[in-house]
Image: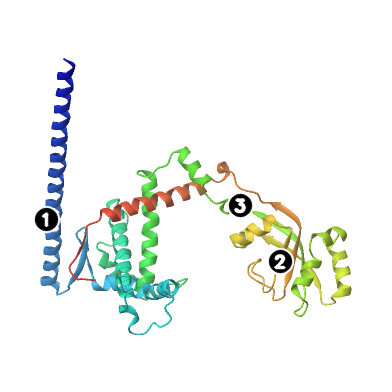
Amino acid sequence: MKKKLIAAAAVLCLLAGLIFPVKLTAEKISAAATLKKEIAADKALAEKIFLETGRKVFGTVNGEPFFYEDIAVFTIELRAAVAAHYWRKYNVSNMGADFWDTVYDGSTPREFLNKTALDELVRNMVLIQQARLRGIDTPAAYSDLETERAEWNTPTGDIIYGPQTLGPAEFNSYRITGITNELKRALLEKELSPTAQQLRAAFNSLDDSLKFDHFIAKGIRFFWNAGIPNQEIRALLEPPLLEKYFTPQEIVSRLSVLYPSLNMEDFEIDSRLVSREAHYDIELENILWEYGSSDLIFPAPFEHPSVYYVTSFEGGGTIAFEDAPGLGLTKWINDQFDVFMNGKVQEARVTLNTAL
């Protein structure tokens, strides 16, 4: 009886193994047939547009057409960046006429540029399509961006703060940034709404330098004219000297004997007005050293080598999650949005009617 049960089980497993691949094969055949029909429809649409307008469709993304001028925006914009990439990676110094068609590791810079431009265009088109599906204001068709730009650049007589006209790349960037923000908000409300645990995990994953709290640092700035050896005077302002001479005034009095051009003045640094790197340095050190024009305080007012001796510090430390949940929310949606968009781009049907 036991042998019969084992034999029966073996037969069932064998049959299941035969049926499952057949089912998978049928699904693949159906998907391939559907894709073939969709590609045929894309090409038929391109032909229809050409017959009706005389415009040659370069390709389609999920059935939506784009034209040569759409992808040219990216090839023009990315040209310098691609050249710089080859200069760094392959140490290319001569970028003459032959550069774009020279083969490096199996492909040419022109091919790399065209592929990168297409990738950027496809991502933008998929982004707009996803926003359109959720009722966000977008161009009716991707190529309508140029129509919107022309309207934007038309003088209205209104007071405009910032550039009065935008080129194709600048307008695309402006428009795509706005649509991206709207799509993130829409996704946060439904599909990508995080749990409290996910928000906290996103906050905890932030680099500590992004969680510094606001502070005010006050103290004395020592500065001197050019000509005094920087390393020598820096050594005189290290902690042993500061411990020996208890006040900044006493330090200056001592040093003024050696260096008559040494000066001092009060300073105050608001952490909201400095770079993240400077913020980090100020919070960790009582003595802050700079060789030339100051990039510590914005805007940079000084032209002489300087040392900042911090005498008081208000605030600082790192922000707790409970005090800044918005930081976790921003980290969460930025990370999840990248995953979301990468998936949608990977699923996109891209049909080219013209070789890159």
Disc 3 residue type?
Phe
Examine the image and state in which quarter residue 258 appears: bottom right
Distance Cα–Cα, label 3 vs label 1: 55 Å
Question: Quick one: SS at disc 3?
Answer: loop
Examine the image and state in which quarter residue 21 appears: top left
Residue ID at (15%, 59%): 39
Disc 1 residue type?
Lys
Q: Which mark is residue 212?
A: 3
Please indicate whether residue 38 sits to the left or right of residue 68 in the image. left
- Tag 2 residue: 289
Residues at marks 3 and 1 touching, judged by CB atoms closer than 8 Å: no
Q: Residue furthest top?
A: 1
Question: From where the camera sits, is residue 86 visible?
Answer: yes
* x and y percentages locating residue 169 in the rendered image: 36, 71
For marks 1 and 2, the one nearer the N-term is 1
Question: Quick one: SS at disc 1?
Answer: helix
Looking at the image, residue 220 lies above or below residue 14 = below
- Tag 1 residue: 37
